[in-house]
Image (cartoon, grey):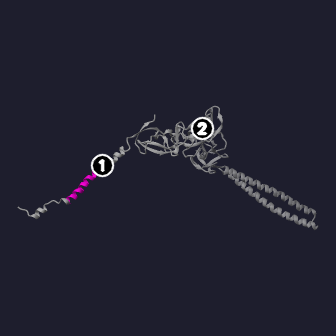
């Protein structure tokens, strides 16, 4: 069947309209491969842009104990103020107000003794003082009356209205009452002193802390007898508690007299407690006790902590390192690194290159004077950190490196 002209025209393909559609589809098809290529190029740059891993020589930062010390010693933590608290008088405990570990203030009540007998004596003394006072008041009234009578009698004597004997008798009464009044005043003073004495005995039955500190031992319980002196049989306590002033803690070490010339006053010291071997406490020499132990051939040295810590307790074992002047410029050094690991020190901005997971990182540090080819570092480099020695100019932040131990 023949087709007309209009039908044939409708069957033609419009190349111009499809060209744009095909161009858009082509762009979409090529966009994803382009992204993949870009990622590959970035990864290639990260992997190879900086070149192959740089070979560097490394060393390990040493702990403070490894350098800087002119002398090592061991000793114990001691307290300059420590007291065993006891009663001033013999008596039976009726109350104990503390337990071990309690923090007490100066003058705080720790215990009380039975005060029944002493309190009765105190009440008697108070009654006697009051009676003496009343007697004094009575004599004062009688003295005042006698003085007025004497004055009237002397006036009458001048007028010749009484005899001389009457005037003398009136004067004698005044003198006698004046003497009795003096005695009464003395009795009042004695009675007051007796009351004060009994009050002191009452106060002595209350046991108080001699200074602020911590109770480290409790040696008596209510019902036990305590005394300031030792009694036979072993049933009487001579002390009830031990108080330590924790602010007075220091270290005492015995230094061999052959090496005492290395120690001087105010010398910097590092202390490590046996209980906390990973913690270093800064300290200093307080004094060198000017006597030697003939049997041990040692000299005692007192060392004070620069700052006290709750972990420091009396009688703890401690090891100390006496630092020389160079090492003391950094108090205390956190670690020691080889002198060749420190760069740019002349500009006041010392740096040390560290290596972790084969990546180099620059760390700014504060250093002291070198000693035995080692430099003390105050902070930033912990003991055990891998550091680069003799770093080259090719070393950069984040550079991948291949570490080898320095020869």
The circle on residue 253 is 2
Residue assigned mark 1: 37
Q: Main secondary structure of the magenta part?
A: helix
Q: Is residue 316 left or right of residue 405?
A: right
Identify the residue shown where x is 30% and y is 48%.
Answer: 37
Tell whether label 2 touches label 1 (CB within 8 Å). Answer: no
**What is the spatial separation of the Cα atoms under label 1 and label 2, in whole angstroms?**
72 Å
Q: Where residue 261 sits: x, y (%)? A: 62, 35
Kindly tell me whether residue 143 is visible in this rendering. yes
Q: Is residue 384 left or right of residue 50?
A: right
The location of residue 92, given as percent across then percent down, is 64, 47
Q: Is residue 366 above or below residue 1?
A: above
Residue drawn at (31%, 49%) of the image: 38
Q: Which residues are magenta?
A: 17-39
Q: Is residue 164 above or below residue 222?
A: below
**Foreground of the two, 399 or 333:** 399
């Amino acid at each position: 069947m023949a087709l007309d002209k209009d039908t044939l025209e409708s069957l033609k393909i419009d190349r111009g309209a499809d060209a744009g559609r095909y161009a858009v589809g082509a762009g979409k098809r090529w966009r994803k491969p382009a992204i993949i290529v870009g990622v590959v190029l970035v990864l290639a740059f990260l992997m190879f842009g900086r070149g192959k891993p740089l070979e560097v020589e490394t060393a390990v930062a040493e702990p403070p104990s490894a350098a800087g010390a002119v002398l090592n010693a061991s000793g114990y933590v001691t307290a300059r103020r420590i007291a065993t608290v006891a009663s001033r008088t013999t008596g039976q405990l009726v109350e104990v107000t503390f337990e071990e570990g309690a923090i007490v203030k100066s003058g705080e009540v720790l215990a009380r003794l039975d005060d029944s007998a002493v309190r009765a004596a105190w009440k008697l003394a108070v009654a006697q003082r009051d009676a003496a006072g009343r007697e004094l008041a009575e004599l004062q009234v009688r003295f005042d009356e006698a003085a007025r009578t004497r004055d009237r009698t002397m006036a009458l004597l001048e007028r010749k209205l009484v005899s001389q004997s009457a005037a003398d008798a009136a004067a004698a009464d005044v003198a006698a009452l004046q003497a009795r009044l003096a005695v009464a005043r003395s009795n009042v003073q004695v009675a007051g002193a007796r009351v004060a004495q009994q009050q002191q005995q009452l106060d002595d039955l209350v046991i108080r802390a001699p200074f602020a500190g911590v109770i480290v031992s409790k040696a008596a319980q209510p019902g036990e007898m305590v005394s300031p002196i030792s009694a036979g049989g072993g049933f009487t306590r001579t002390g009830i508690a031990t108080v330590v002033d924790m602010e007075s803690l220091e270290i005492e070490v015995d230094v061999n007299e052959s090496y005492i010339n290395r120690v001087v006053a105010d010398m910097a010291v590092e202390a490590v407690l046996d209980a906390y071997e990973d913690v270093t406490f800064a300290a200093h020499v307080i004094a060198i006790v000017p006597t030697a132990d003939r049997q041990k051939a040692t000299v005692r040295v007192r060392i004070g902590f620069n700052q006290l810590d709750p972990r420091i307790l009396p009688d703890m074992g401690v090891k100390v390192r006496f630092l020389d002047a160079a090492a003391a410029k950094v108090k205390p050094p956190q670690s020691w690194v080889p002198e060749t690991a420190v760069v740019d020190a002349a500009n006041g901005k010392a740096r040390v290159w560290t290596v972790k997971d084969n990546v180099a990182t620059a760390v700014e540090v504060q250093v002291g004077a070198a000693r035995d080819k080692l430099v003390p570092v105050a902070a930033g480099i912990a003991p055990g950190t891998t550091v680069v020695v003799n770093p080259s100019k090719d070393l950069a932040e984040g550079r991948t490196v291949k570490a080898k131990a320095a020869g």
